[in-house]
Image: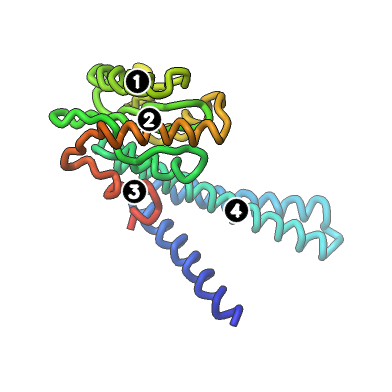
Amino acid sequence: MSNKKHTPRRGGRLKQIWQVFTVTVRNDRMSLLWILLALVLPIAAGIALALLLSRHSVLGIVLWVLFGVLTGVLLALIVLGRRAEAMAYSRIEGQPGAVGAVLRTELQRSWQGSEMPVAVNARTKDAVYRMVGRPGAVLIGEGDPHRLQRLFDEEQVRIRRVVPNVTVHRIVVGDGEDGTVRLRRVSRQLARLKPVLTKAEVAAVNDRLISLERTTGPGIPKGMDPNRLRPSHKGLR
């Protein structure tokens, strides 16, 4: 019974890795070179160490080679994951709702909020998303940095009305110039923020902001559904 349960899972996992590999290599030709280097170099190092340190021991040679193979496979998977992730981000970067697709992953970790924007300019599609975590409230904007300032200011005023003592951070997603943050680096930027709230305070602040949204929630124009944008390996199929 246990074999029947575990075998499909292993097969499904290997199939998923192969699908990610084929799609990534097809869309990013340089990724194949990096993956091969990550795989081959540790194996070569393991063989070299085996010949240098354990040339008179069969067991030592086997262990060094095995170490090199396992290290190579691990590094190759890490490189594959990063290249696939970078390609996925590049495919949705700049599209309306792309930030919401990234926040979906963050909201499964230590942040609370919604993957839907809390403020939207229906004409320009500029949007501001809000998250609450231990660093406080974070407003993340996608669109023109100058036009976003008004949306940021309006949303910050709304936040101050219900939680006046909570720190409010601003992040503008863009091309990485003029203070903006690339889409793929949003998670890293969030991780750099200094925690100031406890988990209980995070939940309380988020509940109060949700209550605010129930009375003054913005309408979301067409084309702003982040559920259709997934920066994940499944979205590369």
Q: Is residue 133 above or below residue 32?
A: above
Residue type beneath disc 2:
Arg
Question: What separation in Å lies between label 3 and label 2 (alpha carbons)?
Answer: 16 Å
The disc placed on residue 74 is: 4
Q: Residue 62: image x %, image y %?
A: 76, 63
Residue at 18% in and 42% down: 223
Q: Residue placed farthest to the right in the image?
A: 56
- The mark that comes first in sequence, 4 or 3, is 4
Question: From the viewer's perspective, is 74 left or right of 153?
Answer: right
User: Residue 169 or 44: which is nearer the viewer?
Assistant: 169
The mark lying in front, picked from 2 and 4, is: 2
Nearer the observer, 140 or 198:
198
Q: Are marks 1 and 4 in contact (CB under 8 Å)?
A: no
17 relative position to 200: left or right: left
Task: Label 1, secondary structure: give it.
Answer: helix
Question: Which quadrant of the figure contains the N terminus?
Answer: bottom right
Q: Which residue is mark 2?
A: 182
* Label number found at residue 156: 1
Nearer the N terminus, badge 2 or badge 1? 1
Measured from the top left, where is residue 110 in percent x and y? 52, 39
Badge 3 element: loop
Which residue occupies 34% across, 53% down?
A: 235
Between the residue at mark 2 and the residue at mark 4, the CA separation in whole angstroms equals 27 Å
| Identity of the residue furthest to the bottom in this view | 1
Q: Which mark is residue 61?
A: none
**Residue in the picture at 29% in, 44% down:** 226
To which residue does mark 3 refer?
Answer: 230
Query: In the image, is residue 137 above or below residue 223?
Result: above
